[in-house]
Amino acid sequence: MTDPLLPPPATLRLTVDTQALADNWRALDRLSGTARAGAAVKADAYGLGVDVCVPALRDAGCETFFVAHWSEVAAVARHVPPAQIAVLHGPLSAADCGYARSTGAVPVINSLEQAALWTANGGGVCHLMVDTGINRLGIAAADAGDPRIAALDIDILLSHLACADEDSAMNARQRGAFAAVSSQIAHRRASLANSAGIGLGEEYAFGLTRPGLALYGGVPRGELAGAIRPVARVEAAILQCRNLVAGESVGYNATFTAPATMRVCTVSLGYADGFLRLRGPGNALSHQGRALPILGKVSMDMVVADLSAAPDLAVGDWLTVPWDINDVAQQNILSPYELLTTIGQRLRRS
Ligand SMILES: *Cc1c(COP(=O)(O)O)cnc(C)c1O
């Protein structure tokens, strides 16, 4: 008997290759030289799902996990010790400090105010972000000697590169500034490089690296190309096949008109699933290498595709959705980060 409370099989699926994910982490750990690699798992592991990704990373050997929000802690803490979870946004209130202490997740302190707040609320082990030029979060290097910083018990001293995916002079400047400040602030581990930063070479790795994108198959620098495998595959099922006659139109605002008789299919995929409207025009779904061009506008839950190249397909057949995050043509529309993090909830549940 099927359980009436469980939904029937989905018509949309995201497959995460956990073996490739683990291999990518190992490769990045190796490329980090004497440093260890951690993992950025914020935004539900870049859209691929914490419950799938974090256990795979943990089992591969990862021991440090970065999220942005306090609301992201609980999901990660189901899989790893909370002391291994760093919260990048840090505490903005006594309530945040209380939550950190009760869960055991570790705040990244980003300002002198956050340092004072953390100490006033009992303190304990924390991490510290120093700004070396990206100007988002972090204390100024000039504040390294402030007594509010001296009062902290700092595990990881972090900074973040602004231009690591480019050959910019800013990279070496930030590296030099970070090396200088790390000699002024007591800490246990130093961490500068994200995925692209690992590609810059071992002198950027310090004691701990923080890859995100490359774990999930993104290649932000050529140096990583041979080491990183794709991780995510998105597929959607055909809901209905239809025959159009010349002059009939498809979808909202009738933006596609059939030039002749043609067979089309309606597919269970829409912008609510992260297949944004701007990915419709000129794009195609595919089936075993056969391209099925998208016709008309992408709806919230559906898209229509041309079956001319695959007239044998029927309801329930699975189509491959282009989600190659390293496809340069697609990157003119969306960055690989956006392609991943806009993957919709319905896909992650399937
Ligand atoms: C998101 C993030 C990372 C990971 O960056 P990738 O480019 O995805 O590798 C590392 N460090 C910080 C502070 C971040 O916010």
Image: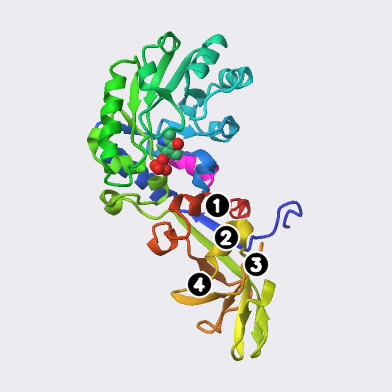
> Does label 4 or label 2 sit earlier along the sequence?
2
Mark 3 residue type: Met
Q: Which residues are magenta?
A: 49-57
Which circle marks residue 74 in the picture? none
> Does label 1 or label 3 sit earlier along the sequence?
3
Which circle marks residue 276 in the picture? 2
State left or right for residue 94 relative to residue 290. Answer: right
Q: Position of residue 90 (x, y in %)?
A: 52, 25
Residue 66, compared with residue 350, is above or below; it is: above
Measured in 3D between alpha carbons, the distance from the residue under mark 1 to the one under mark 3, in whole angstroms, is 16 Å
Question: Callout 1: few (<14), some (14-19), or many (20+) C-alpha neighbours within 10 Å?
Answer: some
Measured in 3D between alpha carbons, the distance from the residue under mark 4 to the one under mark 2, in whole angstroms, is 13 Å
> Does label 3 or label 2 sit earlier along the sequence?
2
Measured in 3D between alpha carbons, the distance from the residue under mark 1 to the one under mark 4, in whole angstroms, is 19 Å
Q: Position of residue 76 (x, y in %)?
A: 53, 34
- The residue wearing badge 4 is 284
Quadrant hosting residue 140: top left
In this rendering, which labeled residue sits more in front, label 3 or label 2?
2
Q: Position of residue 185 (x, y in %)?
A: 34, 15
> Does label 1 or label 4 sit earlier along the sequence?
4
Q: Provide the secondary structure element on which disc 1 rests.
A: loop
State left or right for residue 207 relative to residue 270. Answer: left
Question: Callout 3: few (<14), some (14-19), or many (20+) C-alpha neighbours within 10 Å?
Answer: many
Q: Which residue is at the front of the view, 311 or 276? A: 276
Q: Which residue is at the front of the view, 19 or 64? A: 64
Which circle marks residue 342 in the picture? 1
Asked whether disc 1 touches disc 2, contact meaning CB atoms under 8 Å apart, the reply is yes
User: At 56% across and 81% down in the image, what residue appears?
Assistant: 307
Q: Position of residue 295 (x, y in %)?
A: 58, 76
User: At 53% across and 15% down in the image, what residue appears?
Assistant: 118
